[in-house]
Image: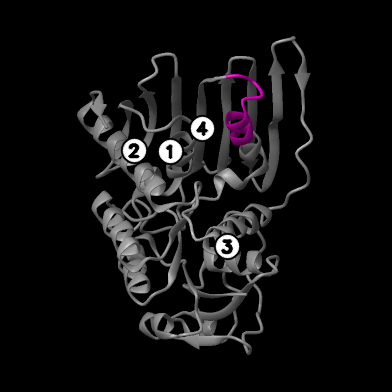
Amino acid sequence: MTNIGIAGIGFMGWIHYLAYQRTADARLAAICEVNPKRLAGDWRDIKGNFGPPGEEVDVSGLARYDNFDALVADPKIDVVDICLPPSAHAAAAIKALEHGKHVFCEKPMALTTEECDQMVQAADRAGKLIMIGHVLPMHVQYQFARAAATDGRYGKLRGGYFRRVISDPLWLKDFYDPTLVGGPLLDLHIHDAHFIRLLFGMPRFVTSRGRMRGAVVEYCNSFFEFEDPDLVVSATSGVIHQQGRPFDHGYEIHFEKATLLFEFAVYGDAGKQLMPLTVLDDAGDVIEPEIGASDEITPFAAEIREMLDAIQAGRPSPILGGSLARDAIVLCHKQTEAVRERKTIPI
């Protein structure tokens, strides 16, 4: 049994809590939270843009800490699950690693490439694993695409288009602060940057055009160039100013023998499958593959399963590994540079 301590009981801490309830060989043993109400188990004020609202939780069986030093000093904790604000990720992860804990940290890994490098180096020194909560590859539609790219069922990858756009998150006061949250690219597009890196490898150049809001990109279109000139990969991400469509994401991924399509959006309060996962094959058929049932917590439970498997095997996760997450941060910063300078940027 792997003992987990969650640091930070906000929206993502709540979602991780729900995911641990579905994981047989992970035991949530401790929580760390500075808010005394939440530390006592009253999570009813937690709300997010998906999943159920917070509830009252029985925390009587958990060790409870109101400071991070006490959590990482607990000898019973094997993994520190960091659900703190992005600006706190690097320092918290490094401290936990130095105390001999594995680290599972919510995305984005950190706000700067330098911090990411320090986190990876700290894990290497400690002989522990650092894994970043990039949950997108665990969604069934993205699992299907990743499996197709891995097993070659549709031939060679030829490229793809990725989209992730939200309404302005007015409830996040620090969203556009590059020193606290990082803005739309580091908070939102980071999902697709990670998935692009996972599918296609690291690009050589990026060209991005978009709008800035202060020091961060508000909205942009990006084109990625790879060593293979036949790979055509692009992405759109950012914020619109109308509140009627709070979320939209999807892809069109091209293989030699098929094209995969998917798009989901929220209009008002209702989610809609604008395009269910669909395969256009080279025989002219239109196929909706069976991908199984999934709810909003399922991908997070799968993410935790991947984290536990890596720890039990004693090897970095090929999906959640720190070096891969670090590369996604690099891609976001290079896109910001390309928008700001209005030119193609080497990576």
Does the segment drawn in magenta span residue 19? no
Chief secondary structure of the magenta portion: helix
Three-letter residue code for mark 4: Arg
- The answer to whether residue 88 is seen in the rendering is yes
Q: Residue 26 appears in which quarter of the rendering?
A: bottom right
Which residue is painted at 34% across and 56% down in the image? 110
- The percent coordinates of residue 180 (x first, y second) are 32, 59
Label located before the other in sequence (2 or 4): 4
Three-letter residue code for mark 1: Ala
Q: Quadrant of the N terminus?
A: bottom right
- The percent coordinates of residue 70 (x first, y second) are 40, 86
Report the residue marked by disc 4.
163
Label 2 to label 3: alpha-carbon separation: 27 Å
Label located before the other in sequence (2 or 3): 3
Report the residue marked by disc 1.
193
Label located before the other in sequence (1 or 4): 4
Label 1 to label 4: alpha-carbon separation: 11 Å
Mark 2–mark 4 contact, CB under 8 Å?
Answer: no
Report the residue marked by disc 3.
308
In the rendering, which numbered label is found on residue 307?
Answer: none
Mark 2–mark 1 contact, CB under 8 Å?
Answer: yes
Along the line of sight, the residue nearer the viewer: 149 or 55 = 149
Span shown in magenta: 145-155
Dot 2 falls on a residue whose secondary structure is helix
Left/right placement of residue 68 relative to residue 115 reads right
User: Mark 2, mark 3: which one is toward the viewer?
Assistant: 3
Dot 1 falls on a residue whose secondary structure is helix
Label 2 to label 1: alpha-carbon separation: 6 Å
Label located before the other in sequence (1 or 3): 1
Question: Would you place residue 76 above or below residue 22 in this image?
Answer: below
